[in-house]
Amino acid sequence: EKALPPGQYHTQEFRPSASFRVDKGWSSEGETSDSFAFSGDMGQIGFSRVPEVFKPGTVDVVEAPKDMVGWFQHHPYLQTDKPEPVTVGGVKGKQFNLVVAKDRLEQDRAAGVCGVDCVDIYRLSSGETISFFKEEKVRIIVLEDVKGETVTIDFESLIADFDEFAPKAEKVLDSVEWTDS
């Protein structure tokens, strides 16, 4: 983790390239060619080009579907809101909130890479597993054509903190610009 002083930042490795602005209180979680993330005092934001998703209830990964919104909406261990239109950096997409379907997860006792109190969602090319936990609320944004790529953005916090964290995350997302370099 590396503290990010308030200011404008540009991705160095992530493609498609992006710039964004943060206020005080954010730290970089790292960047690769297919992901970057940063965290604040109540949650974190991640941007990913998702190559593989976990087959629900298993530790097996499969190629990411073309319809990521549909995949999330039909995931048996997630409870999702209805997708709504959103624009990030001038690119249109869909957004929705989700939580882990605790009853279903506990009933099936599905243990994944992350354990039994969470759901493995996708694996990045770096090998990192992205998982959502029972005590979190997550907003998913899927942008299907950012310079020809599908970009999935997630921001999450504890359920109790989500309503306070969401405006801070949205302020960062409002500053995103997709760049050529």
Image (cartoon, helix red, strand yellow):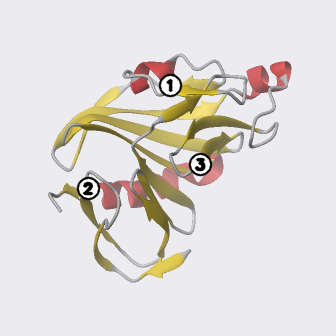
The residue sitting at 80% across, 41% down in the picture is: 115
Residue marked by disc 2: 174
Residue carrying label 3: 127
Vertical comparison of 158 with 110: above or below: below
Question: Which disc number belongs to residue 21?
Answer: none
State the separation of the CA atoms marked 3 and 1: 21 Å
Q: Quadrant of residue 85?
A: top left
Can you tell which mark lies on residue 72? 1
> Which mark is nearer the camera, 1 or 2?
1
Q: Nearer the viewer, mark 2 or mark 3?
A: 3
The residue at 58%/42% (across/down) is: 137
The front one of 169 and 129 is: 129
Q: Position of residue 70 (x, y in %)?
A: 43, 18
Sooner in the amino-acid sequence: mark 1 or mark 2: 1
| Label 1: which secondary element | helix
Tag 2's secondary structure? helix
Residue ID at (39%, 55%): 33
Image spot of residue 4 (x, y percent): 42, 79
Q: Earlier in the sequence, mark 3 or mark 1?
A: 1
10 Å crowding of disc 2: few (<14), some (14-19), many (20+): some
Q: Nearer the viewer, residue 48 or 141?
A: 48
Q: Residue at x 72, y 30 (%)?
A: 59
Name the residue type under label 2: Asp
